[in-house]
Image: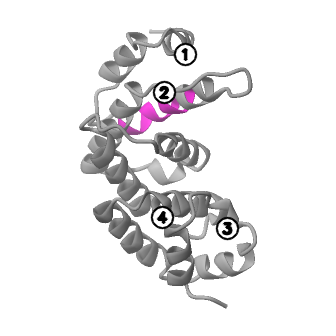
Amino acid sequence: MHSFDYYLAKSDLTPYSGTIIFPNFEALHAIASQDNFVNILNAKLQEAVLENKWNRFSFITHLVATVDNGYHDYQPVYLTMMDFVIKNFSKNTHTTNEQVIEVVLDLFWHQEKHLKDLNREGQLKLFSFLKITTGFKYEVSDYDEATFFAVNKSMDLIKYQNDYGDSRVLKNMFLNHFDIHIRNEAAEWIKD
């Protein structure tokens, strides 16, 4: 069996995580079952944040979505994922990797238990992350419902920053979004 570092090195060279995860699922699942996996994963994710390793970040995000069996508490990893998005999107930097936001939203929404019980710092970080999602232009096509799912996921996650974040600000940002599709979705979802 290869080491986790081997798969991370491969991920740095591979834009599509599935080409690594699916053929190596059993080996990766065995690695993910180790007691210290979250600590190792978070350290590797922090490296990706510092070095702007988009492919590695995407790989780790997809890996967590694939192997989370309820055994580990991924809250530290989620907070590091928020750091990555905040670092790369808060300054309105243009990137071709905008699907990162949708991938993270998808993970958080489907496995939201790791967002429960965030402390003050975690809730403020989630607020900053969600604030970025309100300014994101989700692509709409006949084949993709990304707007619907991403916006609804963003709005569903607002509840996890209620104590220290500002839900009213987030809701208003969605309701006043520059994209009519997002405004319409927000108007349907937000009923004050």
Mark 3 surroundings: few (<14), some (14-19) or many (≥20) residues within 10 A: many
Looking at the rendered structure, the secondary structure element under dot 4 is helix
Q: Amino acid at mark 2?
A: Met
Q: Amino acid at mark 1?
A: Trp
Q: Which residue is mark 4?
A: 56
State the residue in front, 126 or 102: 102
> Which is closer to the viewer, label 4 or label 2?
4
In the rendered image, the quadrant that contains the N terminus is bottom right
Q: Residue at x 62, y 63 (%)?
A: 68
Mark 4 surroundings: few (<14), some (14-19) or many (≥20) residues within 10 A: many
Q: Which residue is mark 2?
A: 155
Q: Which residue is mark 1?
A: 189
Magenta residues?
A: 152-161
| Secondary structure mostly seen in the magenta stretch | helix
In the rendered image, the quadrant that contains the C terminus is top left
Which mark is first along the chain, 2 or 4?
Answer: 4
Mark linked to residue 21: 3
Residues at marks 1 and 4 touching, judged by CB atoms closer than 8 Å: no
Q: How many marks?
A: 4
State the residue in front, 66 or 84: 84
Q: Amino acid at mark 3?
A: Ile
Q: Residue at x 55, y 46 (%)?
A: 103
Measured Cα–Cα span from mark 4 to mark 2: 27 Å
Residues at marks 2 and 1 touching, judged by CB atoms closer than 8 Å: yes
